[in-house]
Image: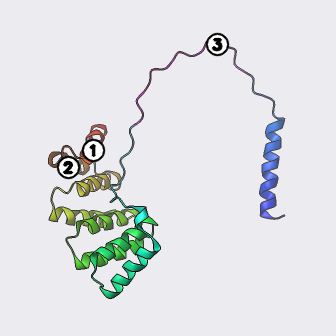
Amino acid sequence: MKRGSLIISVIILLAGCSQNESPAPSAPSSPPPQAMPSMPPPPQPLSLYIVPLDPTGFSMEKIQADKKKVEQEPNNVQALVSLGDANFMIQRFEKSQEYYEMALKSDPKNLLARLSLSNCLIFMQKPDEALKQLEMILGIQKDHPEALYNKGLILLQSKRDIAGAKQTWTQLVGAHPEHRLAQDVKEEMDRI
C-alpha cells in the first residue's frame, strides 16, 4: 500500500469512528452564566527591533545592479548593505552576514549595518556575537536606542540576565524617555 493511500485510509477510518460514536450526554439546563468582567488583553512579548525594510525596494533589477556595483567597487557600503538587507528579507542569514561584514570592513562606524548584522547573528542563534556587535554600536553612540533595546532583550531572553536587561533598559528610558521602544520596555520592566 502506498503511503498516500495509507493516510487517506486512516482519515476515512477516523471519520467513520467519529460518526459511529454516541453523542455525549448533555448537561442539565442551567441559567446562562453571568457576564465575566472584561479582562485586559495579555501583554504582548517584546520582539527584536529590526531595521524596517521596504520589500518593494528589492526587485531583481536592483539586486543585480547592486551586485554589479560591488563587482566594480568592492567597498560600496550602500550596495553591500542593500544586498545584506535583500538576503535578510528572504532569511538567508549567512549570506546577509557576509554582506554586512564586508560593508563594515569599509565603514566600521556604519551603525545601520552593525545593527542589522547583530540581528542576523540572533537569528543564527549566536547571542554572544550579537551582543558584541551591539556593544560596538554603544561604543560609538552610547545611548543608541535600538541597540539598547535589543541588548536588553537578548540579555533577558537569551542570557536570562534580568538585572542586566533592566540596567540596559533603564539607560534607554533615561536617555530617550519619549521613544516608542522606551515606552515598551517600561511596561516590560514592571512585569519582570
For the record, the magenta segment spans 26-42
Residue underneath mark 2: 172
In the displayed orientation, state which residue is furthest to the top: 31
Label 2 environment density (alpha carbons within 10 Å; few <14, some 14–19, many ≥20): many
User: Which residue is found at the position 30% from the left and 42% from the top?
Assistant: 188
Marks 2,1: beta carbons within 8 A? yes
Q: Position of residue 54 (x, y in %)?
A: 39, 61
Is residue 77 within the magenta segment?
no
> Which residue, given by chain and number where applicable, does mark 3 sit on?
30
Q: Which residue is mark 1?
A: 185
Q: Is residue 124 visible?
A: no
Amino acid identity at mark 1: Val
User: Disc 3 residue type?
Assistant: Ser
In this rendering, the answer to whether 23 lies above or below 48 is above
Q: Kindly identify which numbered label has been placed on residue 41.
A: none
The residue sitting at 51% across, 18% down in the picture is 35
